Image (cartoon, coloured by chain):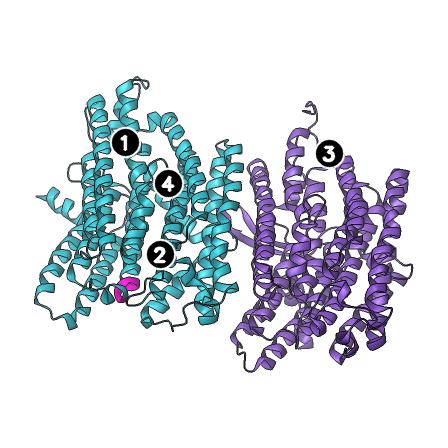
Chain colours: A purple, B cyan
Amino acid sequence: MLNYFSSDYFFSHILSFSIWVPVLAGIAVLFTSNDNKPDTTRWVALIGGLAAFLITIPLYTHFNFADGGFQFQEGFNWIPAFHINYHLGADGIAIPLILLTSFTTVIVIISAWEVIEKRVAQYMASFLIMSGLMIGVFSALDAILYYVFWEAMLIPMFLVIGIWGGPNRVYATIKFFLYTLLGSLLMLVAFIYLYMNTNSFEIVDFYNYQMPLNVQVLIFLAFFAAFAVKIPMWPVHTWLPDAHVEAPTGGSVVLAAIALKLGGYSFLRFAMPIAPDAAHYLSGFMITLSLIAIVYIALVALVQKDMKKLIAYSSISHMGFVTLGFFIFNNLGLEGAIVQMVSHGFISAAMFLCVGVLYDRVHSREIKSYGGVANTMPTFAAFAVLFAMANSGLPGTSGFVGEFMVILGAIQENFWYAFLASFTLIFGAAYTLWMVKRVFYGEIANAKVAALKDLCQREFLILAILAVLVLALGIYPQPLTDMTNATVTQLLSHLMQSKLPVGLPSGL
Amino acid sequence: MENIRYDLITALPEIVIVSMAMFILLADLFLKPANRIAIYLLAQVTLLVAAYITFTTHVPSVSYAFTNTFVDDAMSDVLKLMIYLGTSLIFVYSRQYIQQRDMYRGEFYALTLFAVVGMMIMVSGQSMLTLYIGLELLSLSLYALVALDRDNAKATEAAMKYFVLGALASGMLLYGMSMIYGMTGSLNIAEISGALIGADKLHSVLILGLVFIVSGLAFKLGAVPFQMWVPDVYEGSPTAMTMLISSVPKLAAFAFVIRLLVQALPSLAIDWQQMLMFMAVLSIIIGNITAIAQTNLKRMLAYSTISHVGFMMYGLMSASTNGFVYAMFYIVSYVLMTLAGFGMILLLSRKGFEADKLDDFKGLNQRSPWHAFLMLIVMFSMAGVPPTLGFYAKFSVLQAALQAGYLWLVVFAVLMAVIGAFYYLRVIKMMYFDDPVDRNPIEAPMDMRIVLGINSLALLVIGLMPEKLMELCIYAITRSLS
């Protein structure tokens, strides 16, 4: 086994393994489908998820930290008629997100252990397959390959929300699907346009293609339609609270921890390097939207009565930091945004899991159904308060690092950006801690709360792992920033070069 | 003598099928109802033999027969093979259905085989007259097939509607052909295209003739504004006949368009491009928006067909070799998806129960996860979501249209595709998110289950590896249009 893992074959196809092992594991899980004996299914899923996670670890251990380009590349000619290649590769931005994906899948499988009782096999299989497809999105270097993964990932998510979701799940899941589909189809048109001019779907060829500004702006807006919906940015965020509220816990975790990052990642992979001049030209617009998300959405979060909705709005607000970090075009901001993406992956996953813990016991997400939970569930309350602190950006937790870096980067650009962005530290603390106060502290509110049992071992395990990660990333973010450093520098230098054709009028 | 022998060999598959159709009609009289399976097998063997002949006599070059009224080229051979395959699937899927509804008779197989011959002649017609004869043979067989269950009032009404409107369309087509004949003095496709070089392209008779021809074609394809018959006929016909009407004849209609517009009237390309453009856009709008309001699955698929025809026309209106290749790819994909979709309706239907309401699919995932999964693939493929075949079909025609410079029409089509996705998603929603209304076990013969499984999975597998099918279409079109 060890021999196999160290073999050249494995390392030259490691990304393929990372994608297809979970997908195949998911299909295998479907064949164990038997609702009378769900334990077999659960174990098969867990083993598959763990195997998939272990496969991605060498991506970190064998990463060349000095190289900002694409590593672990592999590929072959997939559909020669359209010059479409199966071309995979990952850089310092993609790999942390790939690791986050395979890790989160394991967490989701464990968190669903006893909670999901109907159609266990389909549930587990959906998450495993989705995990593979999302890793595919992060590692595709061919636009159509990327697009196929990007769209295919919607199918399992659509089913997860629709089958295991809450009462209004059908509305939420169809809204989720159609919103995302609309944006992505416009992106597809942009891809085809670029293909017609470069005669290739290779992302790197897109990078080198020069376009006048008016074309760049259109291309950028087509990408914007796809990615802004996914992130989501204000004002196209409205699908997210619906989807989060209705999704089962696992669905919320994957949505918040990974699906949103697909949008952020794609801005860095497509929209900005392909249309850098448009990105600069529209940066004011993007920053405005980001700041609105940070400030306004934080205020919206403040008035939520539903815990999941509150965390959903808090996610939108935090993702505002990510886009803000992208569009101030400096090293600190960009790296901060990436750290923020990873950190938000841990924190939002943990927050949704915490809500899941309560929901499984009381079957309510309303804040007012709770009160004084700390008295009956002290261990759980300790974890929840830690994650709440992290969510509001307390120093020492991972939530602080990203936000702080972005704010520092923003100051270099414009004082007022930083000024407005730092409101989040107040609002974020306000909505999170107020929720914690109402749910966990005070008198025991009702009989249901009084009857609560503290965490079981399974729940303790996943929350503890996440707590360790949140603290580790908060105290020592170096491993992550080391990884992204070279790539970010290279990306920025690319973004600073104009891609306008020489000798032509700018067009606008 | 040499000539006649050569002609007969070129048309051997047609001759085999016609003879066998007549033989089946006769043999049916002497068979006991219990032995009808022999007729079914005979029909399948006929298709197999025809496929064997078409495949083995295939040469990449173009050859003409019957004094240049009949052509045997790569496109005709590829499309004929597809027609055999599609018809064979129809036979498999419909056997139980027509048994339970007392239509399991020689007439069904004989008429279907006559329709197949009609399609083959349409595919191979090199003269407007041959093309027209092929079309009429196909249409008359289909009219009769729809009315096969003669005590079924709805089906009879559908057949009547189909016949009256179909005859009108044929009349228009013939009228248009006569005008072109008047202007060029020839019925032969190649001679017409030759005669039009240097002719006055704005001559009103020529344009009028083109308008009539395009209207007739649009009617047969079911494109807006000639789509009115489609939903009524689809809904009224027995499902097996709906499956037949909606699938393989579209392959023949595609060839018909290529022969008449692309090969005979390339000089008028600017005019027919515009006509196709309007029809394509309107078809996509009407097809997708009206489909949302349907509660009957057959009716919904009828509107979905209209929108698919619109998408296919995006390829045709590009008027480039690539565009025709992609249109062919689209129509072949469409046929595979439609067969699987109707196959699924037939699978769920049983004696006295049609399974053609959307509600009949509720909770299919609880009744049979496997079949729900297959239908899921079919629906996502129709919606054009990767990694299914339907995605590459849409992707390629949109690419052709973008290459031809129709940027905003492509953006528009894309927006409409999102609306289209909604009603396909609704089917999935019913299968997966709702509880079943009908809890009866699914009864279907094993051969049907297996073939349907392969058919549906093919949508996924070809979606992952579309290269071979695409190469086939490129081969067919480039060899035939050069």
Mark 3 near mark 1, Cβ–Cβ under 8 Å?
no
Q: Marks 2/1: CA distance?
A: 28 Å
First in residue order: circle 4 vs circle 2: 2
Q: Hey, what amino acid is under mark 1?
A: Ile
Classify mark 4: residues with Cα within 10 Å, few (<14), some (14-19) or many (20+). some
Magenta residues span B92-96
User: SS at mark 3?
Assistant: helix
Chain hosting mark 4? B
Residue A127, picture quadrant? bottom right
> Residue B263: image x %, image y %?
30, 33
First in residue order: circle 2 vs circle 1: 1
Residue labelled with disc 3: A277
Mark 3 near mark 4, Cβ–Cβ under 8 Å?
no
Residue A393, picture quadrant? bottom right
> Residue A377: image x %, image y %?
82, 76
Say left or right for A378 vs A247: right
Q: Marks 1/4: CA distance?
A: 24 Å
Classify mark 2: residues with Cα within 10 Å, few (<14), some (14-19) or many (20+). many
Q: Does A444 appear above or below A278?
A: below
Q: Quadrant of the N terminus of chain A?
A: bottom right
Foreground tag (4 vs 2): 2
Residue labelled with disc 1: B213
Residue labelled with disc 4: B478
The residue shown at (46%, 57%) is B427
Q: Does B62 appear above or below A436?
A: above
Q: Hey, what amino acid is under mark 4?
A: Thr
